[in-house]
Image: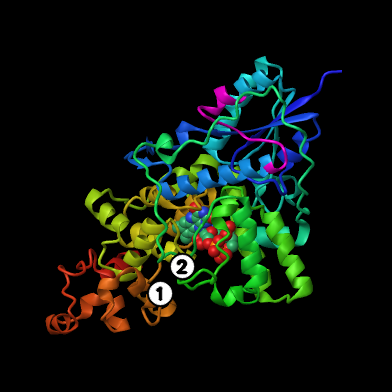
């Protein structure tokens, strides 16, 4: 009898632990793991629709993280006498070609509920039909499995609390799967290929240097992901106070920083949940330990919202198809926001952190997004697309879902806007965060660091910070802009 060969197509599931596509593939006699860099994920793209704009699909921070993650996966597979075939090309030609070259009897992969991912899957499936291979798809990136939802996915409640209550009451989280015994890599498999450079993916990108003002060195890959879980939950013992610290903005440990690894699939949320439960058993079970699960359920919520509403999330009027908001287009204003030159320090500090590191705290994201969407009333999708470029932890559902929420076109029937200065005073009382990213404001007392425009000319001279020279004048009168929203 001839050996059966299975191909496992790694996508945003760059891990060995809790990986059902891998476990299923490993039932074959031989397994060929493949990763494909899709040129469609890089370079400049039009957003499409009315008032289309161009944006960069994947910026340097995430490209770097992904390349490292693929390298880490390959090295873990090689440690197990397997390998990772790496290719650059459209998956609908690469995957069937590799399957044909190794004479694979089956192809396994994970699936996501977002449009581009599903289009790619559909194209791969079409190509396989002729070869008589039915690719098998698995759902593996949420806490609650799609099949375990207590309702049909198109009946998922549009309100987070209703969703959370239902899954807390009527769904369980599956145990993470163990790493399987990985069968040998076929001796006659094609050359594994080399991992491309960042410039091979997009010639405009260069590997960013680690900025030591950043919260954490986000090294890509499952190895670093598991190390982070170990250091945050166990060594640092930070989980016991997560709920109290999670709204801070400086340092590695005010929040878990799991997001880049979760979104590139280096870390399974079910594994995180199993570690939370183990911690609750052996250390402490309190509001903070519950709250990490609570936040992971927000992540689930947006995944299932995308399964339900699909591309409606990318419309200007969002899933509510609102037509009553007059979204503006103003390139110069947008560029100031993106560069962190708005003259509103709390917004600028956050945008500069994003640009320098690819990361921004949740508090920062809420305020930076609200400023663009509500105070400036610029097309919220352009802000979301800018985050898509820059974020090291970008995920379509989490990003566009949160943006739509804040812009008033998503899962919240109230118009939400953040009072930026009030938030700055509450979450950055001593202006340490603002000064960390805007050293030009270092000499100012906290109240002026948050509202430099309230300084008189004499005070500006005394403190050596002249508006318009050392730091921008505010691009909008915040108070007047709130009036238009009330
Ligand atoms: C405008 C805007 C855009 C965002 N874009 C993204 C994105 O592209 N990718 C992304 O992962 N998160 C996004 N978030 C959610 C949140 O800001 C980040 O998940 C969080 O800051 C990541 O840091 P952490 O891992 O330390 O979070 P923690 O506070 O430690 O939370 C643990 C995990 O819970 C999940 N989570 C927490 N809050 C949310 C939330 N509001 N929505 C969805 N998941 C959540 C994340 O997976 C996170 O890693 C966005 C939020 C806003 C307001």
Q: Which residues are magenta?
A: 79-95
Question: Would the CB of label 2 be found within 8 Å of ligand 1?
Answer: no
Mark 2 touching mark 1, by CB under 8 A?
A: yes
Q: Residue at x 73, y 50 (%)?
A: 149
Front position in the image: 209 or 299: 209
Residue 82 magenta-highlighted: yes
> How crowded is the residue under tag 1: few (<14 C-alpha within 10 Å), some, or many (20+)?
some
What's the CA distance linking mark 2 and mark 1? 9 Å
Q: Is residue 320 left or right of residue 43?
A: right
Q: Looking at the image, which is closer to me, 86 or 360?
A: 86
Up-down relation of residue 416 to residue 440 (above or below): above
Read off the residue under disc 1. Answer: 423
Q: Is residue 7 magenta?
A: no
Q: Is residue 471 left or right of residue 458?
A: right
Query: Secondary structure under badge 1?
Result: helix
**Which residue does the image show at 55% across and 22% down from the upper left?**
93
Q: Would you say residue 159 is visible in this rendering? A: no
Q: Residues within 10 Å of mark 2 (few under 14, many from 20)?
A: some
Label 1 within 8 A of ligand 1 by Cβ: no
Seen from the viewer's position, the closer of residues 133 and 296 is: 133
The answer to which quarter of the image holds residue 292 is bottom right
Q: Position of residue 113 (x, y in %)?
A: 60, 41
- Which residue appears at 21% of the width and 75% of the height? 453
Residue 204 vs 174, above or below: the answer is above
The x and y percentages for residue 72 are: 59, 46
> Tag on residue 169?
none
* Outermost right residue: 1
Q: In the rendering, at what x and y percent does residue 155 appear? A: 66, 47
Residue 228 occupies quadrant = bottom right
Question: In x, y percent, where is residue 131?
Answer: 68, 16
Q: Is residue 247 above or below residue 45?
A: below
Q: Residue 363, labelled with which disc?
A: 2
């Amino acid at each position: 009898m001839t050996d059966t060969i299975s191909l496992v197509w790694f996508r945003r599931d760059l891990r060995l632990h809790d990986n059902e596509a891998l476990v299923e593939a490993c039932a074959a006699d031989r397994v060929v793991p493949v990763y494909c860099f899709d040129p469609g994920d890089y370079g400049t793209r039009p957003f499409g629709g009315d008032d289309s704009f161009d944006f960069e699909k994947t910026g340097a921070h995430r490209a770097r993280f992904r390349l490292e993650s693929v390298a880490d996966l390959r090295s873990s597979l090689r440690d197990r006498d397997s390998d990772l075939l790496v290719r650059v090309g459209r998956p609908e030609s690469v995957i069937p070609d590799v399957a044909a070259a190794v004479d694979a009897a089956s192809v396994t992969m994970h699936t996501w509920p977002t449009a581009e991912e599903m289009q790619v899957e559909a194209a791969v499936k079409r190509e396989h039909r002729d070869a008589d291979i039915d690719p098998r798809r698995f759902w593996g990136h949420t806490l609650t499995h799609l099949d375990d939802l207590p309702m049909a996915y198109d009946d998922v409640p549009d309100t987070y609390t209703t969703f959370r209550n239902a899954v807390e009451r009527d769904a369980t989280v599956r145990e993470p799967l163990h790493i399987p015994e990985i069968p040998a890599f076929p001796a006659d498999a094609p050359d594994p290929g080399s991992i491309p450079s960042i410039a091979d993916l997009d010639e405009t990108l260069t590997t960013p240097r680690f900025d030591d003002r950043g919260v954490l060195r986000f090294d890509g890959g499952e190895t670093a992901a598991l190390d982070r879980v170990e250091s945050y939950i166990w060594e640092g013992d930070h989980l016991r106070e997560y709920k109290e610290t999670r709204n801070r903005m400086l340092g590695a440990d005010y929040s878990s920083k799991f997001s880049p690894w979760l979104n590139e699939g280096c870390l399974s949320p079910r594994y995180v949940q199993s570690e939370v439960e183990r911690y609750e058993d052996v250390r402490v079970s309190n509001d903070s330990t519950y709250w990490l699960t609570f936040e992971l359920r927000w992540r689930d919520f947006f995944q299932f919202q995308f399964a339900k509403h699909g591309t409606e999330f990318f419309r200007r009027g969002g899933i509510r198809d609102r037509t009553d908001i007059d979204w503006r287009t103003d390139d110069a204003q947008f560029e100031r926001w993106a560069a962190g030159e708005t003259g509103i320090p709390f917004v600028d500090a956050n945008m500069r952190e994003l640009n320098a590191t690819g990361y921004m705290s949740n508090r920062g994201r809420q305020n930076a997004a609200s400023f663009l969407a509500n105070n400036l009333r610029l097309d919220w999708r352009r802000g979301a697309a800018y985050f898509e470029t820059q974020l090291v932890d970008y995920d379509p559902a989490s990003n566009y879902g949160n943006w739509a929420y804040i812009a008033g076109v998503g899962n919240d029937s109230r118009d939400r806007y953040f009072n930026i200065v009030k938030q700055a005073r509450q979450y950055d009382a001593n202006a340490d965060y603002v000064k960390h990213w805007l050293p030009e404001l270092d000499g100012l007392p906290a109240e002026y660091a948050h509202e430099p425009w309230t300084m008189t000319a004499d005070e500006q001279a005394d403190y050596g910070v002249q508006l318009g020279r050392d730091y921008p004048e505010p691009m909008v009168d915040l108070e007047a802009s709130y009036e238009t929203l009330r």
